[in-house]
Image (cartoon, rainbow, N blue to C red):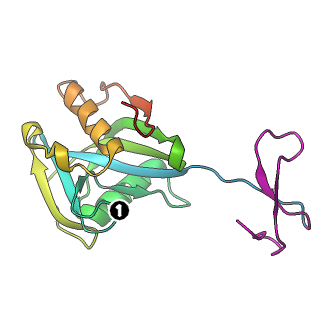
Amino acid sequence: MKFCSNCGHKVNFEIPQGDHRVRAVCPNCFTIHYENPRLITGTLPVYQGKILLCKRGIEPKAGFWTLPGGFMENEESLAEGALRETWEEACCKPVIQQLLSVVSLPPINQVHCFYLAKMETGEFSITPESIEIQLFEINEIPWEDVAFRTVKATLEHYCQFKDLAPGALPLLETAIYPNKPI
């Protein structure tokens, strides 16, 4: 940020009184501009024991497999965002069963949250965001072609506890840093 979004004046970077972090502060209107992590939300859709994965048609990681998900929008809940993203990426309307994972990515200021979701039917279709969609048995998951570490961590967590009843799976809450194991 170089200019204040309230008045257009050039901002200074300083620690505001009573704060402990450097912030963009407008010396003209005194607005403090806070930057906060972005939320990514999605689902791990399951149909008859198989997991739905989408092959990305867009960057980043075009051509790699992922769970349907994306950035949460204003004026929607985390669950609403997960279902919207699932529809946008797979034309699928699953029913959310429980929050499955919350994975922080401090180096890039993101938090990824995935819900376990049950597909009532096996209906889905490709979209501009997903060039291929497939239901995978757990032993068929293309692990080497999974797009993101957060998705891989969520899939591994689900695979470990898949035999528990929905609602009884433990929540995966972790952070991922470059070059560190999860």
> What is the quadrant of residue 56 in the picture?
bottom left
Decide which of 58, 160 is in the foreground and name it: 58
Whether residue 142 sits left or right of residue 174 in the image: it is left
Decide which of 140, 126 is in the foreground and name it: 140
Look at the image and tell me whether residue 32 can be seen: no
Q: Residue furthest front?
A: 179
Residue assigned mark 1: 60
Is 32 rendered above or below residue 28? above
Is 102 rendered above or below residue 135? above
How far across and down, in percent of the image, does residue 16 sit? 86, 47
| 164 in the magenta segment | no
How far across and down, in percent of the image, does residue 124 sit? 17, 62
Decide which of 41, 149 is in the foreground and name it: 149
How far across and down, in percent of the image, does residue 134 sit? 12, 55
Whether residue 132 sits left or right of residue 75 in the image: it is left
- Chief SS of the magenta region: loop
Quadrant of the rendering where the N terminus is positioned: bottom right
Total labels: the figure holds 1
Is 82 rendered above or below residue 130? above
* Circle 1 crowding by C-alpha within 10 Å: few under 14, some 14–19, many from 20: few
Residue under the image location 55 percent in, 61 percent down:
74
How far across and down, in percent of the image, does residue 39 sit? 50, 50
| Residues rendered magenta in the picture | 1-28
Quadrant of the rendering where the C terminus is positioned: top left
Residue under the image location 42 percent in, 54 percent down:
80
Residue type for callout 1: Pro
Look at the image and tell me whether residue 55 can be seen: yes
| 22 in the magenta segment | yes
Is 169 rendered above or below residue 60? above
> What is the quadrant of residue 154 in the picture?
top left
Residue at disc 1, secondary structure: loop
Residue under the image location 50 percent in, 57 percent down:
76
